[in-house]
Amino acid sequence: MRLFNCRKYTERETGVKTAVRSVRNGRLVVLPTDTVYGIGGDAFNPATVRALLDAKGRGRDMAPPVLIGSRRALDGIASDLPESATALAEAFWPGALTLVVAYNPSLTWDLGDTDGTVAVRMPLHPLALELLKETGPMAVSSANKTGQPPAATAAEAKKQLGSSVTTYLEAGPSADNVPSTIVDCLADPPRVLRAGAISLEELRKVVPETEGPEEGE
């Protein structure tokens, strides 16, 4: 278990390389994102995903989102991508928007009880993108124990998660602790499942029919 201060160039380079090795070896890492710090690992390693859920104190019914390092990666993950998802990704990625889409049934992963869907996001953080471009898609959830406040730094995450994580990447306090907005693009019309950093008004400028979390019930 080691924490790297990635605000220092030399530690950043070593930290990213160490985190890449950790992910490839099925270990968990803590990384900064443009919203809150995340705990993550290889999305295609079922044991890693189970370890992530155990570290947070969650069950299979709370499957972690998947972070990707490029817009192109969404096409490889999603099956029959809705037009709304394409439009929202083009408008807000990289950024604080999570899209719920159907995943390609040929993918060999087990994120939990997802009923064939995945919540996917491309974060707007240079360190996260650098890591994701080396590791490929990562299952990532907020770096905290369930019921505890999200960590604003890697050091805070370390206090909660301890030795369940192999590598911690510290990039300073989160600029914004507001979580990403989650939109269900499989709903017709698309619907906000969780209000967050991107407002309903902003979403409707791109996909006018988008419903808020209280609508359509």
Image: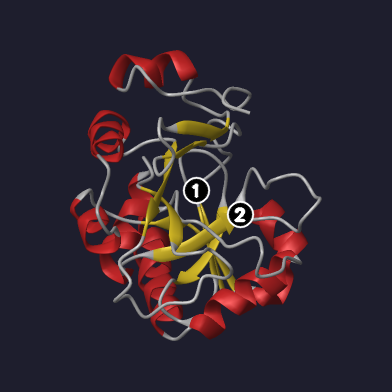
Give the answer, above or below, for where 26 lies relative to 93: below
Residue depicted at 40% across the width and 34% down the height: 188
**Viewport quadrant of the C terminus:** top right
The one nearer the camera, 200 or 28, is 200
**Would residue 126 appear left or right of 163 to someone viewing this image?**
left
Residue 43 in the image: x percent, y percent? 43, 71
**Would residue 50 appear left or right of 118 to someone viewing this image?**
right
Residue depicted at 32% across the width and 52% down the height: 129
Give the answer, above or below, for where 25 lies relative to 91: below
Residue 111 in the image: x percent, y percent? 51, 70
Residue 123 in the image: x percent, y percent? 38, 44
For residue 154, the mark is: 2
The one nearer the camera, 197 or 102, is 102
Q: Badge 2 local density, few (<14 within 10 Å), some, or many (20+)? A: many
Q: Amino acid at mark 1?
A: Ala
**Residue 130, can we see it?**
yes
What colour scheme governs how the chains and residues are painted in the rendered image of this protein?
A: secondary structure
Residue depicted at 29% across the width and 76% down the height: 106
**Residue 27, can we see it?**
no
The one nearer the camera, 28 or 114, is 114
For residue 171, the mark is: 1
Q: Badge 1 local density, few (<14 within 10 Å), some, or many (20+)? A: many
